[in-house]
Amino acid sequence: MRIDKVTVADNNVWLVGDDQRVVIVDASHDAPAILAAAGGRKIDGIVCTHGHTGHVNAAIALADASAAPVALHPADRPLWDALHPGRPPDIELGHGDVLQMGGTLLQVWHSPGHSPGSVCLHLAEAGVLFSGDTLRKGGPGPAGEPPGDFATLIESLRRLLLYIPPATVVHPGHGGSTTVADESPHVDEWTRRRR
Ligand SMILES: [Fe+2]
């Protein structure tokens, strides 16, 4: 298994796969840069952790260049539709779904709060969680802008950090990586400071 990262502006795009195929986690800003990182491998899917602009704005260009389906949780369709009217995603993500893409199995965790349709993707075989903007190094992503909701986000994080094994490496949508063990002791602190 191979996990590659491309950082475009301040967004992390993750590519998971092997030498033949790959799944792309988040479609940020620059389709040619992401295609270059895929390096001619077959793109099995483009999975968006949520519908905010910097995570979906290259999705159509990537899909058109690769014929790969785009996946998004339906609760973020209003965000998606504002950016890509008349071009719905191909796959609706649901909590517990297992995506067989890039030669791996990615389990979908619906983790609303940063946005209603935010998801994390658990790659259990590698001990990795792609957390989008739900969890970053040092705390959750912001929930200050509607339709984000902080109480919902904390609830999602408590559930997530309870079930995902502590040794799991967390690869977020922004910034450096962390682990579940490093972040989980701080949930009460985040709850108090409300960010
Ligand atoms: Fe976001």
Image (tube, rainbow, N blue to C red):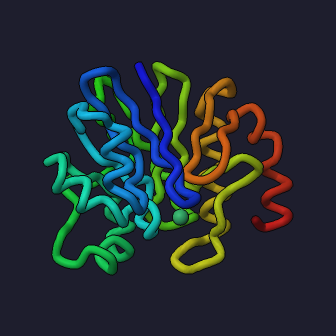
36 horizontally vs 191: left or right: left
Is residue 50 visible to us here? yes
Q: Which of 128/65 is in front?
A: 65
- Residue at image position (30%, 34%) is 39
- Residue at image position (25%, 31%) is 41
130 horizontally vs 16: left or right: right
98 horizontally vs 14: left or right: left
Residue 157 screen position, x and y as percent = 64, 50
| Picture quadrant where residue 190 is located | bottom right
Quadrant containing the C terminus in the rendered view: bottom right
Quadrant containing the N terminus in the rendered view: top left
Residue 45 screen position, x and y as percent = 26, 43
* Residue 65 vertical placement versus 194 (above, below): above
Residue 70 screen position, x and y as percent = 25, 53
- Residue at image position (59%, 42%) is 160
* Residue 146 vertical placement versus 118 (above, below): below
Residue 191 screen position, x and y as percent = 79, 60
Q: Which of 5/72 is in front?
A: 5
Q: Which of 93/171 is in front?
A: 171
| Picture quadrant where residue 180 is located | top right
For the image shown, how many numbered marks are present on the structure? Answer: 0
* Residue 132 vertical placement versus 151 (above, below): above
Is residue 100 visible to us here? no
- Residue at image position (55%, 46%) is 131
